[in-house]
Image: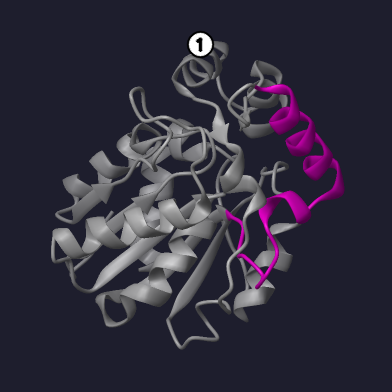
Amino acid sequence: MVTTTKRTFVLVPGAWMGAWSWHPVAGKLRGEGHDVVALTMPGLSYGSPARGVRLADAVDFVVREVEALDLRDVVLVAHSWGGYPATGAAHRLGDRIAKVVYYNSVVPARGVGMIDENEVYGKAIRDSIAATPDGTVPLPLEAIQFGLMPDASAELQELVFGLALPQPGGYMVDALDVPTVAEAGLPAAYLLGVDDNSLARPGDEFAARLGVAAVPVPGSHMALLSKPAEIAAALIRAA
């Protein structure tokens, strides 16, 4: 990877994941001379209760972290469900944001929560919230093996299963009352794994919400863990 401009990347993980899901990519970005902050949303680490956590809490958290570190010219990167808190935060952070990059990510439509982006996913989410005592959505091993990362080794699939935590239900139900970042005048890009079959809608549809074409990158939905060098290189090009 070769780049002449130092960037500050803030990495927002997808559902069930923490900052750890970005660590292999973050290491590659750091190795190329960039500053990197990887975030874990409230309710998705041990000791951080998931009950009652709402999408607004995740948006507030991203904003607080960027402001507390006084970050400027931020390339805000969202993976998967992370498109929700990243989009909400980008609107509030304004001129601190240089670009928003969505990677295998939902680009939220105004007033539409994750639960309403796909009828099949929505039913599974509702059933999980109703069945769990803390209103969370667990991640089955089978979803990792056959959906999120079918191209990864069994060892990596099982490691991810052991690291993932149940997603707070409020994160999946709540919607944003903001337009897309492109409509707000923020530069944006969309990276789409060529083997990703786990998005709630085709990635090209999400890219179209930004008015851009999806840029193909290697791997399935979780290639940030299985192909970190390639994904880091794609982020640098997109930034």
Name the amino acid type tagged 1: Glu
Residue 111 falls in image quadrant: bottom right
What span is colored magenta in the figure? 105-132
- Is residue 126 shown in magenta? yes
Q: Residue 233, how many percent across, how many down? A: 36, 53
- 199 with respect to 84 (left or right): right
Query: Going by the image, does 219 lie left or right of 56?
Result: right
Above or below for 183 versus 9: below
For image coordinates 50% across by 50% down, the residue present is: 79
Q: Position of residue 58 (x, y in %)?
A: 42, 51
- Is label 1 in a helix, a strand or a loop? helix
Residue 46: quadrant of the picture:
top left
Q: Is residue 58 left or right of residue 1?
A: right
Where is residue 201 shown, x and y percent of the image?
76, 55
Residue toward you, 47 or 193:
47
Residue 125 lies in magenta, yes or no?
Answer: yes
| Residue tagged 1 | 155
Q: Quadrant of the C terminus?
A: bottom left
Image height of 62 relative to 14, above or below: below
Choose between 48 and 215: the one closer to the eye: 48
Q: In percent of the image, x 67 and y 66: which residue is there?
A: 206
Residue 200 shows in the view: no
